[in-house]
Image (cartoon, helix red, strand yellow):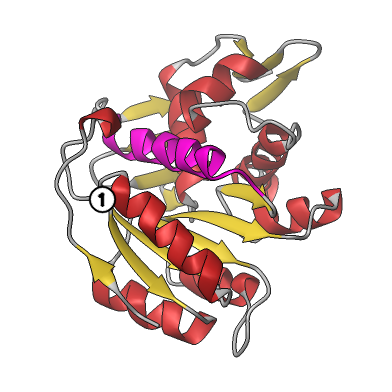
C-alpha cells in the first residue's frame, strides 16, 4: 500500500516547511492508524508495507523522517537502514519494533537509527518523538562553520573533515559533533547534550548518548588520531585535547 496525504499547517507543530514522513510497516491496521495520526499533526505522510517498497518511496519523496518497522517481508528494517546509510541518506530514522531487549536497542542504534520506539506504544509518545525530530531539522539556525584542532564542520554543506579528510556521519552523529564543536573545552552534562541534540531524554534508552559518543570516537580516532571527546566522570563530556 502506498499513499500520500496533503495537509494544511497545524500551528502546534511550529514548523515552516512541508515535512514528509515515511511510515514502513507490514501491519496494515497499525500503518493506517499512524498515517491518520501524523496526517492530523500536519505532515505529508507516505506509507509502505515492506522494505523494497520503502526504498522506492525514499527515492520518490525524499522524506525527512522515516518510521521503520524491524521485522518485515522481502527486506527487513535493518537492511533498509543499512542501504540508506550506505547511500549517505540523511533522513532521521526511528525504528519501530517489538524487540525490547537492550542488545536489540543497541543493534538498532549501531545500524544507524536516530531513535528506537518499542511496540506496543502510546500514539502521543510517537507524536512527541516525531515533533522532537522535526525541531532538530527546523532549529538548525547556526549555519557558521566551526573548527577545533584539526576538526572542521560546515552545517551549510553538511560536511565534516578531520585533517582534511571527509568524515562519513549519520544525521545524529553530525548533530552531536556540531554541538560539541559549538562548545569546545566546555564540560557538557549528559542531560544538557540530550536536550540540545535529541530534544528530549530518550526515556528507557539511557545509554544512547554513550553509544553515539562511541561512534564518533571510532571515526575521529581512526588512524591513530588522539582522542578529542573526553569523558568527565560523573558529569558528561568535553571536546578538548588532553
Disc 1 packing (10 Å; few <14; some 14–19; many ≥20): some
Q: Position of residue 136 (x, y in %)?
A: 38, 35
Is-magenta flag for residue 222?
no
Is-magenta flag for residue 130?
yes
Q: Position of residue 141 (x, y in %)?
A: 24, 27
Magenta span of residues: 121-139
Q: In the visual, does 226 lie left or right of 43?
A: right
Residue 163 in view of the camera: no
Q: Position of residue 234 (x, y in %)?
A: 80, 11
Q: Residue at position x 69%, y 58% from top?
A: 108
SS for callout 1: loop
Residue 7 in view of the camera: yes
- For label 1, the residue is 19
Q: Residue at position x 58%, y 46% from top?
A: 115
Which secondary structure is most common in the magenta stretch?
A: helix
Q: Quadrant of residue 112?
A: bottom right
Q: In the visual, does 105 lie left or right of 157?
A: right
Amino acid at each position: 500500500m502506498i499513499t500520500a496525504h496533503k495537509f494544511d499547517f497545524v500551528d502546534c507543530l511550529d514548523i515552516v516547511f512541508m515535512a514528509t514522513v515515511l511510515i514502513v510497516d507490514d501491519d496494515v491496521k497499525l500503518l493506517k492508524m499512524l498515517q491518520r495520526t501524523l496526517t492530523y499533526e500536519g505532515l505529508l505522510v507516505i506509507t509502505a508495507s515492506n522494505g523494497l517498497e520503502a526504498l522506492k518511496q525514499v527515492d520518490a519523496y525524499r522524506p525527512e523522517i522515516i518510521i521503520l518497522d524491524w521485522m518485515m517481508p522481502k527486506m527487513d528494517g535493518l537492511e533498509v537502514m543499512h542501504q540508506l546509510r550506505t547511500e549517505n541518506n540523511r533522513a532521521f530514522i526511528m525504528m519501530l519494533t517489538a524487540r525490547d531487549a537492550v542488545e536489540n536497542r543497541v543493534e538498532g542504534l549501531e545500524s544507524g537509527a536516530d531513535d528506537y520506539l518499542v511496540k506496543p506504544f502510546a500514539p502521543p509518545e510517537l507524536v512527541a518523538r516525531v515533533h522532537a525530530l522535526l525541531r532538530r531539522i527546523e532549529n538548525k539556525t547556526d549555519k557558521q562553520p566551526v573548527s577545533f584542532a584539526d576538526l572542521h564542520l560546515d552545517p551549510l554543506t553538511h560536511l565534516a573533515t578531520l585533517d582534511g579528510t571527509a568524515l562519513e556521519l549519520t544525521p545524529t552523529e553530525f548533530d552531536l559533533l556540531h554541538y560539541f564543536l559549538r562548545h569546545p573545552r566546555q564540560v557538557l552534562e549528559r542531560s544538557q547534550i540530550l536536550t540540545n541534540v535529541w530534544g528530549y531524554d530518550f526515556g528507557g534508552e539511557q545509554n544512547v548518548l554513550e553509544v553515539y559518543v562511541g561512534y564518533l570516537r571510532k571515526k575521529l580516532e581512526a588512524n591513530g588520531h588522539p582522542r578529542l571527546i573526553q569523558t568527565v566522570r560523573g558529569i558528561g563530556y568535553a571536546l578538548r585535547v588532553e
